[in-house]
Image: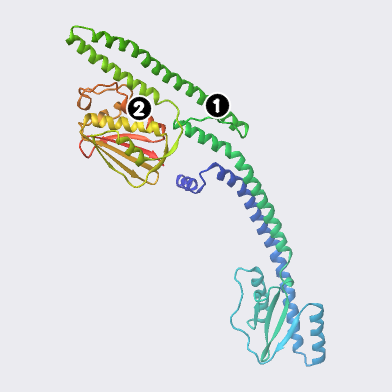
Amino acid sequence: MLYGLNNFIKKILPKRLFYRSLLIVAAPIILLQIIITVVFFDSLWIKSNKGMTRSLVSEIRTLHDIYKSPDTEQKQNIINLYNKNFDFRISFKPDEVMPKNSTERWYSPMDRSLRRELKSAFQHSYWFDTTSYKNLVEIKVKYGSGYLQILFPKEKIAPSSARIFALWIAFPGLLLIFIAIVFLKNQTRPIINLAKAAERFGKGEFIKEFRPSGAREIRQAAYEFDKMRKRITVHLNQRSEMLSGISHDLRTPLTRLKLQLALLKQQDIAKKMGDDIEEMERMLNEYLEFSRNQKSEDTETVNINSLINDLIGKYDGQKINTNFDGENKINLRQNTFKRCLGNLIDNGLSYGKKVEITTKRTLKDLIIFIDDDGPGIPQEEYDKVMKPFYRIDKSRGQNKSGVGLGLSIANDIIRSHGGNIMLDKSPINGLRVRISLPL
């Protein structure tokens, strides 16, 4: 039961730090105001209102008794004194019928108190209205064949201090909450900026400048993140430069070997050696492509449909079908993503005769399917082919050159965009590559 209650509390609590902090600050202020208000209304306002109402009803009962006196002159003098000294407006309505429907408000303490005292004094021979006039209360009491109509200021039964008290209770609370919101915004903004910078860096985006700000602990975390980011960036640049340098330096001896083979008289040996050199050049090209993938590039909003159409336009004579699910715009690094799709399309055309590209949009993701009709990949090899330099020797990898970097490069690019890539069996009997990118 406690576990279920704990889960329920977690569900209803806000998820963001700003709103949780605001709840911690605002909840005690609101709770304190509610307690003070309840205590005030119970011990001061309600009791004061009850005493004032009881006194007023006693005066009305006195007036009712005065009307029973046969001395008309004395009765009128007393009524004039009430009108003059107590702000009463008293009149007798002979032969008029009292209203039957009460205008009492069930939620008003003033109305409840007035009803209770009038009922105690006059049983059911009364009627009152506290809403028709802004500053007056009207009471009608049954008398003879008609009724007495009494009008008096509302302040006689409603203490004016209640409104002032409510204002002074609400205003400081709202002011404190507003100040808390301003300070909390300033305190949570550095954390949000740090989270956004970490997210961008995790997706492989180039962060030009990051300035730590906020409290000392937040600044310390931001400084450490910036130092880590710079170390990782230096490491990636060194790896890229090393791969690029090695691949570039190896081209020179390979070129000399090709020139020497052209002068060799034994053509059968020259042909075999030439094939090996060409395979080495293809391997070097893949190394260079792998190193280029580590270079920084700015993110921009791209129409995926246009990008795919531009890319497949370079494959003249190749059978590539597309099926787009409406307009699909997304933020990504255009050239890097083109390289990823190019690798996957080349991979499909190398092992099959046709490739089908399908896009599907969900609430949170953009899904891209790349299917081919080749021999496919065994299911137990799905995870292994994503590793760099891994090559399968059967089925799909048979008699094909390469160093096993195509799918690894594609996987690295997709993950750097915050997405994921999965392999499955294609509906056209080959390999299906499923790319998921967050919108």
- Say which residue appears at 79% left-offset and 92% top-offset: 72
Closest to the observer, 89 or 33 = 89
Closest to the observer, 119 or 291 = 291
The residue labelled by disc 2 is 409
In the rendered image, the vertical position of residue 137 relative to residue 331, given as above or below: below
The image quadrant of residue 43 is: bottom right
The image quadrant of residue 123 is: bottom right
Closest to the observer, 82 or 398 = 398
Q: Residues within 10 Å of mark 1 (few under 14, many from 20)?
A: few
First in sequence: mark 2 vs mark 1: 1
- Say which residue appears at 63% left-offset and 88% top-offset: 97
The residue labelled by disc 1 is 224
- Say which residue appears at 51% left-offset and 35% top-offset: 195
Does the image show residue 121?
no
**Residue 299, how many percent across, how many down?**
45, 35
- Say which residue appears at 26% left-offset and 28% top-offset: 381
**Residue 386, how many percent across, how many down?**
32, 27
Measure how far apart labels 2 and 1 are at the Cα level: 29 Å
**Residue 113, how many percent across, how many down?**
66, 71
